[in-house]
């Protein structure tokens, strides 16, 4: 049987290319390396609390990046957030039911407030990126309770997604490589400058505050809102 030609209006649309292997290019995403090999049908996911950046947070990032020049070229973190889980893999056919299960688990959790009281140095598990972040002060109890609630749906899918000893924080600037010791040498001076900045901006004892009424589960390019009570 002879195949009919493609209609003219569709001939200019490029064919979608699907590869089983995607080469990781750190230059395309700020030096980050993929923790999981790319496989078709596997969606890299995590649960987090989003933060809406403000004028004051922009100034704080500028203060920190300027402080470390020219020795270290610190860069702003895209879309700052507080992670509740490690990254984990969802099979594509799990996603809809998994999201329903997680939404059902967290919907009875009360809304709450997060505050941050100091700057600390953090690293990713591979130790190829070093971060400066704001450590959570008020709200740790609510976050730990949220993790307990989330464990059941994650356990149903046999997902290892929780830190053994979570230290809740929000990374705001980063630098490639393992430069933790180098940053910590001058951290007391930086903290003094940050405290002075907060005082001059009319702040009290908190560097930042987030009012939490939902979480986000990001899986691949999709984001799902997990509404709290």
Image (tube, rainbow, N blue to C red):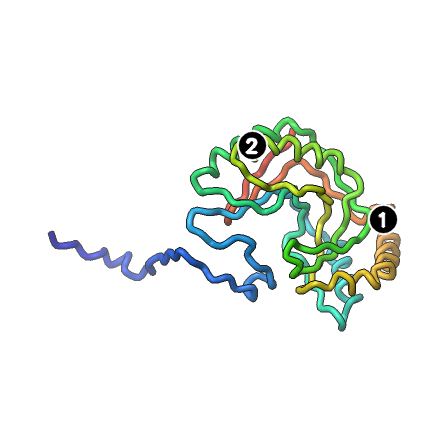
Residue with the mark numbered 1:
203
Q: Position of residue 123 (x, y in %)?
A: 70, 56
Q: Is residue 195 left or right of residue 74?
A: right
Q: Position of residue 183 (x, y in %)?
A: 78, 63
Label 1 vs label 2, nearer the camera: 2
Residue 92 visible to the viewer: yes
Q: Which mark is residue 146?
A: none
Image quadrant holding the C terminus, namely: top right
Q: Residue at x 74, y 69 (%)?
A: 72
Count the labels in the image: 2
Which of these two is toward me, 172 or 132?
132
Give the CA distance from mark 1 to mark 2. 39 Å
* Residue closest to the far left: 1
Q: Residue at x 34, y 60 (%)?
A: 14
Q: Position of residue 4 (x, y in %)?
A: 17, 54
Q: Secondary structure at mark 2?
A: helix
Q: Which mark is residue 153?
A: 2
Q: Is residue 188 left or right of residue 9?
A: right
């Amino acid at each position: 049987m002879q195949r009919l030609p493609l209609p003219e209006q569709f001939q200019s649309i490029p064919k979608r290319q699907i590869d089983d292997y995607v080469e990781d290019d750190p230059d395309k995403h700020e030096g980050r390396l993929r923790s999981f090999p790319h496989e078709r049908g596997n969606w890299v996911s995590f649960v987090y609390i989003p933060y809406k950046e403000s004028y004051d947070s922009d100034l704080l990032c500028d203060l920190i990046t300027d402080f470390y020049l020219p020795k270290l070229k610190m860069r702003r973190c895209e879309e700052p957030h507080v992670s509740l889980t490690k990254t984990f893999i969802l099979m594509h056919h799990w996603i809809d039911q998994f999201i329903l299960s997680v939404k059902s688990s967290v919907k009875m959790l009360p809304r709450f407030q997060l505050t941050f009281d100091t700057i600390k140095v953090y690293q990713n598990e591979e130790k190829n990126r070093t971060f400066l972040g704001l450590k959570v002060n008020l709200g740790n109890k609510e976050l730990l309770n949220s993790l307990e609630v989330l464990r059941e749906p994650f356990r149903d899918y046999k997902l290892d997604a929780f830190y053994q000893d979570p230290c809740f924080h929000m990374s705001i600037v980063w630098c490639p490589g393992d430069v933790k010791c180098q940053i910590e040498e001058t951290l007391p001076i930086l903290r003094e400058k940050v405290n002075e900045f907060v005082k001059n901006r009319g702040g009290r004892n908190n560097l930042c505050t987030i009012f939490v009424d939902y979480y986000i589960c990001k899986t691949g390019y999709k984001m799902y809102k997990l509404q709290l009570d």
